[in-house]
Image (cartoon, rainbow, N blue to C red):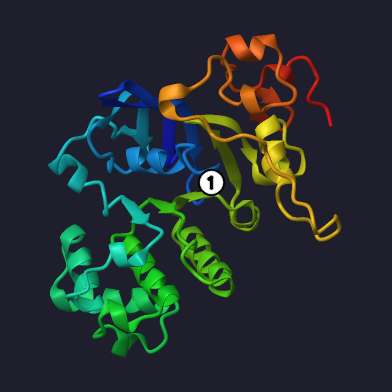
Amino acid sequence: MPATLQVEDLCVEFHTHDGVLRALDRVSLVIEPGQIVGVVGESGAGKSLTGAAIAGLLEPPGRVVAGRVLLQGERIDELRGEQWNRIRGRRIGTVFQDPLTSLNPLFTIGDQLVETIRAHQPLSRQEAARKALALLQETGIPGAAQRLHHFPHQFSGGMRQRVVIALALAADPVLIVADEPTTALDVSVQAQVMDMLGRLCRDRGAAMMLITHDMGVIAESCDRVAVMYAGRVVEQGPVRAVIDAPAHPYTRGLMASIPDMASDPRRLNQIDGAMPRLHALPTGCAFHPRCALAQERCRREAPPLQDAGRTQAACWLVTTGELAA
C-alpha cells in the first residue's frame, strides 16, 4: 500500500520585483495511513506554505518549480483548475486557524454541510442531511439536530472549529491538512479539539499533517514531526526521538525555549537572532548566523538531511559527533 502522502524535494518560488525568492527548498515528507505528522517551526519557516502547496492552495505569484507531491501514489502537484476540484475536499480536507474564514455567515451550518457532502458524493439531500447530523454528533456538537439550523455566529469559537472539522471530514478524505487548528481557541478547549480531531482521523484511517508552532501540541498529538527553518526541513523523525534527543541545534533551541517549572521562572531560554528573510538568506546552512556551534563549512555549504541516530538532521556536525549531548 502506498503512503497516503509523499512529498519529494518540493521547491516553491515567488517571482517578485526583488527577483526570484525560493520559499521552500527540497522539502520531503511521508505520511502513512492513519498517521499524524506534525510540522513545526517559527513564523516564516514555510510550514503553512508547505500545507498550501500540498492542498493546491498556492496563490500567485507562488508556484511549485521542482519536486513531486503524491497522494496515494498519484502525482497531484501538476494538477490544474477543475482537476484540483476533484481532489480538494474529496480526498484532501483542510482545517484552518480561524473557523470564520471557512464558514459562510449567510447560510446555516446544516446547509453548508449538506452542500459540501453533495458536491463530493452522489447522495440525495435527505441522505446528505443524515450524514451531516452524524458528522456533528461525531465532532461532539451538543444538540446536533437543532444546531444544524443555526448560523456560524451562534456558535462559540470551539464549536465553530468542530463544525469546520466536520466539513473537512464530510467527503471522507484520506488526508487532512490542519493549519494551526487550535491557536485561536482557549487553552482549555485546545486539548479537547485536538483529541477529537486525532481520534476521528485514526478511526477513519485518514492521515493528518498538523501545522503548528506549539511543541506541546506536537508531543501530545503526533506520531512523527518535521522541524522546519527558512523553507527547509532541518530535522525529522519519531516525535519522542526528536523531543527527547533532538539532533539539530535549532531543534535543541526550540526544546530549550519551552518553559520548565523546575528551572528559574524569571528567565526563559531563547534562540538569539531572527529567521532570515527570503531575499536575504545566508549562504550555506540558513541557521548558521544563530548557531553557537557553526563552523566554516556551515557558512559555505547547505547540509542535506542525514541519519542522526533515531532521527534525520540537516547539520554537518552530525557526521563529526560534535552534536553529542
Indicate the position of residue 139 as horizontal and vertical percent values.
43, 74
Q: Which residue: 26% across, 77% down? A: 109
Where is 306 relative to 239, above or below?
Answer: above
For the residue pair 253 and 80, the one nearer the viewer reads as: 253
The N terminus - image quarter? top left
User: Would residue 312 be visible to someone looking at this image?
Assistant: yes
For the residue pair 216 and 237, the one nearer the viewer reads as: 216
The secondary element bearing badge 1 is classed as strand
Residue 42, image quadrant: top right
For the residue pair 228 and 313, the one nearer the viewer reads as: 228
Q: Which residue: 65% across, 41% down? A: 238
For the residue pair 241 and 230, the one nearer the viewer reads as: 230
Residue 48, image quadrant: top left
Where is 207 relative to 163, above or below?
Answer: above
Q: Which residue: 27% across, 26% down? A: 16
Total numbered labels placed on residues in the image:
1
Where is 83 relative to 61, above or below?
Answer: below
Dot 1 surroundings within 10 Å: few (below 14), some, or many (20 or more)? many
Residue 135, image quadrant: bottom left
Indicate the position of residue 297 as horizontal and vertical percent values.
66, 9
Indicate the position of residue 87 as horizontal and vertical percent values.
25, 46
The C terminus - image quarter? top right
Residue 255 lies left or right of residue 197; in this view the side is right
Amino acid type at image mark 1 = Val
Indicate the position of residue 73 as horizontal and vertical percent values.
36, 34
User: Would residue 314 be visible to someone looking at this image?
Assistant: no
Pointer 1: what residue? 37
Residue 265 lies left or right of residue 171; in this view the side is right
